[in-house]
Amino acid sequence: MSYVECTRCGDHLAADRPQNVCPKDGGVLYVRYGLASLKGKLRREDLSGRVASMWRYAEVLPELPDNEKPVTLGEGFTPMLPSREHPNVYIKDESLNPTGSFKARGMSAAVTMAKHYGLKKLAAPSAGNAGGALAAYAAAAGIEAHIFMPKDVPIANRMECDYYGAHVTLVDGLISDCGRMVAERKDKEGWFDVSTLKEPFRVEGKKTMGYEVAEQLGWKLPQAIVYPTGGGVGMIGMWKAFDEMEELGWIGSERPKMISVQAAGCAPIVKAWEGGKGASEMWTDAATFAAGLRVPKAYGDYLILSILKKSHGTALAATDEEILAAMRRWASVEGVFAAPEGAASLVAYRKLRANGFLSAEDKVVLFNTGSAYKYLDMIEAQEKKARPVPAARSIGGIIGPY
Ligand SMILES: Cc1ncc(COP(=O)(O)O)c(C=O)c1O
Ligand SMILES: [Zn+2]
């Protein structure tokens, strides 16, 4: 790791101390490595036999002194499952990560670096899963975590944070309100802000999904990747990974169409995309049971929208009813009990096949970003809303048999 670079003005900042965003223009910072000197020295074949976690890509992750180890719980290198329903479709199953979502990757990297810098108190707003992941990695690192979450997050998120020993504040509002509280209090409290895209290392952890897509598909990227988008770090990280792999000579210049799926009740990126805008507007009255997609304004919206454009991708929304039906479909046909955010990828795939944006021949990776087991209360409530009279086979039903 040589330095961090602003994605807006291109300024370079030192990476030997903690950084948040560009002090000049608030731009998101990207970590840059001396990839040119690695080209030819680090080959794809060198990965075989390495640890089956995201840390197998150590050379393109923050470098640590010999006496320091990453804060790891075994995150990454999740299964790439060929779909049983759709030929040429793969489900990248991030639900198998520690704490049950892809958020583990970003927090493993961010907490590793926080420990390296000697930071003692971290803070973040969270729609749910990021908080759980931060709490777990902070516990493993012996660092304090201060987490601000909407009061109606899934029970699992509140409970895991509590058990991991984090300081949790439940907020009568959305993740944007939580973010404001962190910003207002962090200086006084001595917290380092690890909000989405407000420190450079969560992207580094999440970019490993891009490396895995390439490695697990034999170093040929798919025609399209569908990603449930809240703050957008998964999408942003993968795009960065593709550029890095090209610099390393591991892949060519081809890129998948990047497709953002959001919830119809909170779809600021879709609205901006459809309006041809380069940034999004704050979404009012955001509501969806896909808690991780309830992000009314993404800090890195300008990066997401530029990736959609550059990749010839698109953005589309799924209603809660469609998401619930897709969850049942994936569970009953694929054996994958997906988080609502993940199941939204299936809704998107079906719509894009129906309107001809994708064809049956296209190789497509659908990201299941998390586990349904963390949403049981939300799913039950959604089932009741969808089917007020319990059906015999409904999980809300009191009449059998199954
Ligand atoms: C399961 C799940 N999927 C997707 C997202 C959205 O991720 P991102 O903020 O990287 O767009 C979240 C965020 O909380 C999540 O928990
Ligand atoms: Zn800048």
Image (spheres, rainbow, N blue to C red):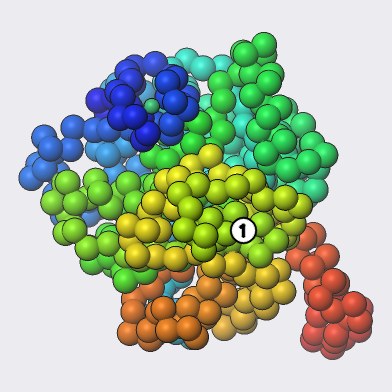
In percent of width and height, residue 400 lies at 87, 86
Image quadrant containing the C terminus:
bottom right
In percent of width and height, residue 3 lies at 29, 24
Q: Residue at position x 91%, y 81% from top?
A: 389
Residue 344, relative to residue 291: is it above or below?
below
Horizontal side of residue 170 vs 43, given as left or right: right
Does the rendering let one see residue 120? Answer: yes
Residue 124, relative to residue 333: is it above or below?
above
Does the rendering let one see residue 67? Answer: no
Ligand 2, seen in the image, is in the quarter at top left
Q: Name the residue under label 1.
A: 267
Q: Residue at position x 24%, y 46% from top?
A: 244
Q: Residue at position x 29%, y 23% from top?
A: 12
How crowded pointer 1 is (Cα within 10 Å; few <14, some 14-19, many 20+) is rated as many
Q: What element carries label 1?
A: loop
Numbered disc total: 1
Q: Nearer the viewer, residue 364 or 376?
A: 364
Residue 191, relative to residue 216: is it above or below?
above
